Amino acid sequence: MAVTIHPTAIVDSAAQLGSDVFIGPFCTIGPNVKLGDRTRLISHVVVDGHTTIGEDTVVYPFACLGLRPQDLKFKGEPSTLEIGKRNQIREYVTMHPGTEGGGMATRVGDNGLFMINVHIAHDCKVGNNVIFSNNATLGGHVIIEDFVLIGGLSAVHQFTRIGAYAIIGGMSGVEKDVIPFGLVKGERAHLAGLNLIGLERRGFNRDDIRALRSAYRMLFAPEGTLGERLEETATQFRSQAQVERIVQFIRTGGDRAICQPKLEDE
């Protein structure tokens, strides 16, 4: 089907536009941009840099995608921003491309909802089926796995990992890695249990949830070290796939420590 471009939009002739793309009033599209089939830019959207947007994605007014990252080490290298399919990118969202120091690419998966004023910094890797509430912010090099929900006005420190199916409470400052299925909250976020409501909504069965709750209590018991408790958990729940996901997440490690429950005297 034909591409629709409003007469007030500025679209570089070198940009690659899929079929049935809609570009609304006052949008600006750079020469190295690729828009997938049926992408819709409602109005006043800026897409620049080496940016790819997957099919059936809708971008709302005043979003800025692919502009120069906020990294003083960036020297204009041809890094990329790769956005997947069927995303909803709401007003004033910013997503920046990668840098030489982070693998040259920022990647966003499919089926995400990015609410007003969300920021995804350079070199982040964001999975599928995520929800970022209003004003959620990622520092550079953050990894967000699938089905993560980040509450409004929350900020995730650079190089932090958030495991699959985790939930970040609103107004949280996340400085440490969050285990899969975890629930964290607080001005300096601490682990506050499992994302039980999210597990139920995603169709996890009672046996999985029961195993995860038992493994959680074992992992974060007051006795022993985290390393000792991790090995005990891995042995006791070695046949439980969802617990194994947490075990491997911790074993893999990262640049940040693991977010843990708040001590009683804190």
Image (spheres, rainbow, N blue to C red):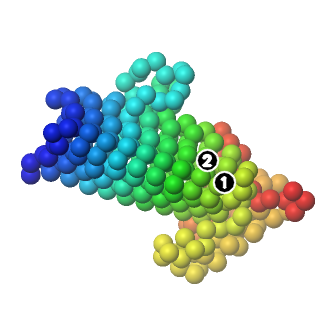
In this view, the residue farthest toward the right is: 265
The residue tagged with tag 1: helix, strand or loop? loop
Q: How many marks?
A: 2
Against 11, residue 250 (above or below) is below
The quadrant holding residue 14 is top left
Quadrant location, the C terminus: bottom right
Residue 66 x %, y %: 38, 35
Viewer-side residue, 141 vs 213: 141
Tell me if 136 is positioned left or right of 90 in this view. right
In this view, the residue farthest toward the left is: 1
**Residue occupying image coordinates x 27% and y 39%:** 27
Viewer-side residue, 159 vs 152: 152
For marks 1 and 2 on the same chain, the one whose residue lies earlier in the sequence = 2
Tell me if 94 is positioned left or right of 55 in this view. right
The residue tagged with tag 2: helix, strand or loop? strand
**Residue occupying image coordinates x 21% and y 37%:** 9
Residue 82 x %, y %: 36, 41
Residue 129 x %, y %: 43, 59
Report the Cα–Cα distance between label 1 and label 2.
Answer: 6 Å
Give the amino acid type for the residue marked by disc 1 in the picture. Answer: Ser
**Residue occupying image coordinates x 55% and y 22%:** 72
Tell me if 111 is positioned left or right of 3 in this view. right
**Residue occupying image coordinates x 83% and y 54%:** 225
Q: Which residue is mark 2?
A: 155
Q: What numbered label is drawn on residue 154? A: none
Give the amino acid type for the residue marked by disc 2 in the picture. Answer: Ala
Are circles 1 and 2 on residues that touch, CB within 8 Å?
yes
Q: Which residue is mark 1?
A: 172
Residue 182 x %, y %: 64, 62
Tell me if 210 is positioned left or right of 102 in this view. right
In the rendered image, is residue 105 in sight? no
Q: Few, some or many C-alpha atoms within 10 Å of disc 1 (few <14, some 14-19, many ≥20)?
A: many
